[in-house]
Amino acid sequence: MSMPIWRTKSIDHLTGQQSGLKRVFGPWRLIAMGVGVTVGAGLFSLTGVVAGQNAGPAVTLSFLIAAIAASFAGLCYAELAGMIPAGGSAYAYAYTGLGEGAAWIIGWDLILEYTVGAAAVASSWSGYLASLLKGWGLAIDPRLLAIPGTPVTMPDGSTAHAWFNAPSIFIICAITALLMRGTSESVRFNTLVVIFKVLVITGMIVACIPFIHLANYHPFIPPNTGEYGHFGFSGVMRAAGMAFFAYIGIDIVSTAAQDTKDPQRNMPIGILGSLAACAFIYIVFSTMLIGIVDYPRLANDGSPVATAIDQVHMPWLAVLVKIGVTLGYISGLFGLLIGQSRIMHNMSYDGLIPSAFSRLNKRTQTPWTAHILTAIASSVLAATMPIGALGAMTAIGTLLAFIIVCAGVTALRLRSPHTPRRFRVPGGPFLIPALGIISCGIVMGSIDAATWERLVVWLILGVFIYVIYGMRHSHLHKTPPHDPS
């Protein structure tokens, strides 16, 4: 008998698997979800941070590098999504192409990625909410706007230490409550929010073009400070690694196959459509942002859009943009929280984690247990960890998922060459997947050591849980798989 880690699911088994989830996504709703997740904290917060700390004006180049690497992975996602209409994203693809061990590793990685990503989005949203309310003469106690121990300035000018980031807890719980009401209602609301957000971003770009200062782009790649990742080309690559936080949307889209009508047709459209739209928005927006605000001012600015819009001295536009950004974060949290619940639902359905996570509420047909646990974990992280660390953890998790998906395309081309595919990656089974693995691997290697250490600790914990629980409770342990190919 083969080692448990090499057990694979057949494609026929995944195709016929019934999840009980309602199929409410069409191609446009999938693109809206991908754009909604991708055009969020990555654009509204991390763009300024990585420009100020790592790449300077060359942050535009960083987003371009990340987009190229993500496009290789996006093509691979599109092939697997059109071939395997199962929820679970990279987890399901790895289970079919690489085996249960790889599926567990990537599923465990995705749990971390989505939980931490939701925390990062909520943390960034808190700053924009405070800026918006301040413009209306409403102030939140500064001690409730930062992680514990952070020095903050009180209204009377004195200095105090922050308690925790309270608004981030509120928004996570609010979006979780919306998702628990039912997928159909939350999807309609999310689509409207995404349309409004894109209109606001477009309006801001058009309005701010006359205020761009070309001197802010010089030097385009600031000289390295002597430390790896702080400007110079290494800074561009470090920023590209952080930029992968932005492209998590294509992974989120692929988690929703079991909620999608005709997934073999609509999933590739949703994945590639959201990738193209988001790459364009990020490159244009980052170019505009640096042109308005000199990059050193953005190094520790969690709300660079608010800073930029305040500089153009158009109060009515500032209010509109801040409202749009504040509401826009809702779509990012929506995608991350729904993606997390679907990953846990699928792993539970396969027996790798307890069955409580695949149990659906009878009235709403949503996985309440997964939603509640995710909300608790994300709230704790958002309230107590800096956004830079949260963003880096999300980015490294996304990159690992992309690498495994690229490897899965090659494995399934060799293992199941005759299985119907609605979309095929051009260039055969090796070229694009290899380029995806190499480019994502290079960017992954540029991420700081502390983030790598956190990832390794999390994966070691995951291996321990798999050996103790998942390996023995796996449904494939009880029913040996049969792959008709």
Image (cartoon, rainbow, N blue to C red):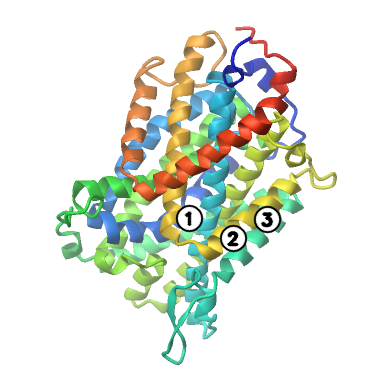
Question: Could you tell me the amino acid type at mark 1?
Answer: Gly
Q: Residue at x 85, y 44 (%)?
A: 362
Q: Secondary structure at mark 2?
A: helix
Sooner in the amino-acid sequence: mark 1 or mark 3? 1
Quarter of the picture containing the N terminus is: top right
Residue hosting label 2:
380
Residue 40, disc: 1
Disc 2 crowd rating (10 Å Cα; few below 14, some 14-19, many 20+) is some
Q: Secondary structure at mark 1?
A: loop
52 left or right, relative to 367: left
- Which quadrant holds residue 377? bottom right
Q: Nearer the viewer, residue 473 or 134?
A: 473
Q: Secondary structure at mark 3?
A: helix
Q: Residue at x 21, y 66 (%)?
A: 213
Residue 369, disc: none
Q: Position of residue 316 (x, y in %)?
A: 44, 76
Residue hosting label 3:
176
Q: Position of residue 345 (x, y in %)?
A: 69, 38
Question: Could you tell me the amino acid type at mark 3?
Answer: Thr
How far apart are the two marked residues, 3 and 2, measured between alpha carbons? Answer: 14 Å
How far apart are the two marked residues, 1 and 3, measured between alpha carbons? Answer: 17 Å
Question: Could you tell me the amino acid type at mark 2?
Answer: Val
Above or below residue 164? Residue 230 is: above
Sooner in the amino-acid sequence: mark 3 or mark 2? 3
